[in-house]
Image (cartoon, rainbow, N blue to C red):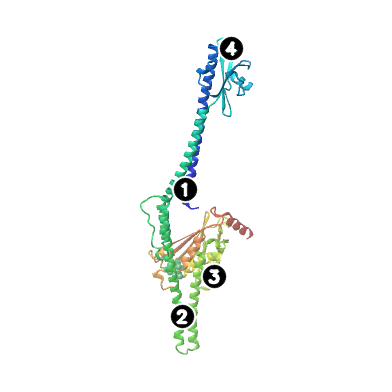
Amino acid sequence: MNIRTRLTLLFVLLVASILLLFSVSVYYLYDQFRQQEFEQRLEEKAFTTVRLREDVGEVPQADLPVMADEQITIYNDRGLVLYNQGNQRPRFPISPSFLRKVTLKQSRYVRLGDIEAVGVRYKTQRGESFVIVASGNDRYGFSKLDRLRQILIFGWILCLFIVGIAGYLFATDALRPVAELIAQVNAISATNIHERLRVGRQRDELADLARTFNALLSRLEEAFVSQKSFVSHASHELRTPLTVMMGQIEVTRLQARSTDEYEVAFDGLLDEVKNMIRLVNGLLELARASADAATLNYQPVRIDELLWQAQSQIIQKRPDYQIDIDFENLPSQEEDLVIVGEESLLQTAFQNLMENGCKYSPDESVLVRISFEPGQIQLTFTNQGHGIPATDLPHIFEPFYRSESTMTIRGHGIGLALTQRIITLHRGKIKVESTIGKETKFRITLPIANAPSLDTGSAVAATRVLQQG
Ligand code: ADP
């Protein structure tokens, strides 16, 4: 069911319920009014009859207006019929208990089908007491009530019909801007992603929706453009070593070479292949870190162990690098060292920062400091050296961005982008501070496993590992 039909139905249902409530109330109140009025007439009739009988001795029928099925009966205080209009047997059965109730002034009205009766008590000057029961059929009142019911039912159906049509037109009109929005959105594709929806000057929800959609388009366009530039950067980074390798092979093949010359050429090629493998591995890791967090294998891991492992991995490749790991303060308990994360990704992030620290400092050394704060661990990677110019700082986490000042040092510019994604995946933060000619400091904060914001599943797993360990 589309929104227009649903809105129309809802509208009709709402108005129908309100009108029904109104009609039933009117009908009920009018019925009450009719009953009170008829009760009053019966009461007047009863008093007039008994007074005429007392004062004149008889009841002249022709002088009194007669109601349909009228019946007036006078009972004495012992319940015996003294007078019955037309001297017929009372058609309306009056029970002794009703007479008693009338005497006690507890009740005075009773109804049986269309016939209604009112009982009144009358005391003569001689001290005699009677109960007069007047009954009749309020044909006139009932026919008015019937007419009212017909009018209300007819009016209700007519109103529903009108409301249905009005509701449909109203819903169509209200949803026209939505249809326009849909048409505009349908016209936007990858080729004209720069186009935006017309917001207009209105300040309603649809203008908000258009604005929200425009913001989404801007984000998508940004992602789309960066994706495009990512692909072109990646192709460029891959093409460069391939071109170098092709050049080397062609030059080597120009003439017959000595074994030593071939060895030099192969070493050069091997270097380029290693370089390419590094780049491709980085790209693969970047793709993994950009995947849905739910697909990663999160486990409780000890941060100090990860750092030691990262350090030894780098030292194995580059024994000339110096990586110092230092505890600024000690954790109050062992659990404070545990974070929930994907071990290999965190390793990659720490290795990138350690490698960068050594790579970009003249003394090829980096200092890693661990400090503990309530609910989180802070890691700083500090190295001396030329630092990062302020103009480059906002961009260094972008994929393939490399500072002009370090172009002489080999790299692809994806290490920091990858590190930032990994840290964000682990709900951490990474910041950089750099003083030109002095030092560069990367500061990472990561939530610990038993931090209150973590889901209980991770915290329980972390505690289990700690208990086992
Ligand atoms: P790569 O090191 O392969 O160039 P990264 O993404 O790791 O790529 O780093 C991006 C840029 O940030 C580097 O080219 C360098 O200019 C700068 N940079 C990163 N880490 C440091 C550091 N510790 N000291 C100085 N500059 C750094």
Residues at badges 1 and 4 in contact (C-beta under 8 Å)? no
Q: How crowded is mark 4: few (under 14 residues within 10 Å), some or many (20 or more)?
A: few
Q: What element carries label 2?
A: helix
Nearer to me, 325 or 293: 293
Which numbered disc, 1 or 4, marks the residue closer to the eye? 4
Nearer to me, 116 or 334: 116
Nearer to me, 419 or 8: 8
Q: Which of marks 3 and 2 is nearer the N terminus?
A: 2
Asked if ligand 1 lies within 8 A of label 3, the reply is no
The image shows residue 393, relative to residue 86, as above or below, that is below
Q: Mark 2 points at which residue?
A: 245
Q: Residue 355 at what x, y percent from top left?
A: 48, 69
- Tell me the kind of residue under disc 3: Gln
Q: Earlier in the sequence, mark 4 or mark 3?
A: 4
Disc 1 versus disc 4: distance between alpha carbons?
A: 70 Å
Which numbered disc, 4 or 3, marks the residue closer to the eye? 4
Q: Is mark 1 on a helix, strand or loop?
A: helix
Q: Which of marks 1 and 2 is nearer the N terminus?
A: 1
Q: Mark 1 points at which residue?
A: 8
Q: Which of marks 1 and 3 is nearer the N terminus?
A: 1
- Tell me the kind of residue under disc 2: Met
Q: Residue furthest left?
A: 201
Query: Who's the residue at 52% across and 30% down the image?
Result: 142
Q: Earlier in the sequence, mark 4 or mark 2?
A: 4
Q: Residue 351 at what x, y percent from top left?
A: 51, 67
Q: Is mark 3 on a helix, strand or loop?
A: helix
Disc 4 versus disc 3: distance between alpha carbons?
A: 123 Å
Q: Earlier in the sequence, mark 1 or mark 4?
A: 1
Query: Who's the residue at 51% across and 18% down the image?
Result: 62
Checking the image for residue 128, the label placed there is: 4
